[in-house]
Image (cartoon, helix red, strand yellow):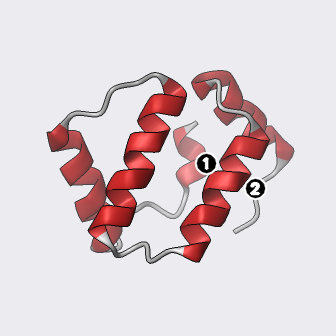
Amino acid sequence: MGFSDNFFNKVEKKTKVDKNTILELAKQLQENDLKNENTLRDVIQKLSVMTGKPVSKEQENKIINAVINDKVPDNVDKMF
């Protein structure tokens, strides 16, 4: 799935995380097992720090459950 600059601009505007940081994080995700709970927790914590938005343990568990069970929507860009 390719993302346009428009997508990155929307994400940056909403989260204050720039395109290069997003791409670096995406590379880290590609190099690791996305079904690994520890990897996911690490990424969620990094995103929380980058965006300045705290993620509760309950939210973190829901995100991990969605990713591990392939319940992430295909149209993620619509979320921004």
* Residue 73, position as x, y percentages in the image: 44, 60
Give residue 11's mark.
none
The residue under the point 55% across, 57% down is: 75
Q: Is residue 69 above or below residue 47?
A: below
The residue under the point 21% across, 34% down is: 56
Q: Is residue 52 above or below residue 79?
A: above
Q: Is residue 25 above or below residue 31?
A: above
Front position in the image: 67 or 72 = 67
Q: Rounded to the nearest whole Å, what is the CA distance between mark 1 and mark 2?
A: 8 Å
Seen in the image, is 78 located left or right of residue 45?
Answer: right
* Residue 37, position as x, y percentages in the image: 28, 67
Q: Quadrant of residue 9?
A: top right
Q: Is residue 25 above or below residue 55?
A: below
* Residue 17, position as x, y percentages in the image: 65, 31
**Is the residue marked by circle 1 packed among few (<14), some (14-19), or many (20+) residues within 10 Å?**
some
Front position in the image: 13 or 43 = 43
First in sequence: mark 1 vs mark 2: 2
Question: Residue beneath label 2, please?
Answer: 3
* Residue 79 visible in the displayed image: yes
Label 1–label 2 contact, CB within 8 A: yes
Looking at the rendered structure, the kind of residue marked 2 is Phe
The residue under the point 52% across, 41% down is: 79
* Residue 71 visible in the displayed image: no
Question: Residue beneath label 1, please?
Answer: 77
Circle 2: element type: loop
Seen in the image, is 10 located left or right of residue 42?
Answer: right
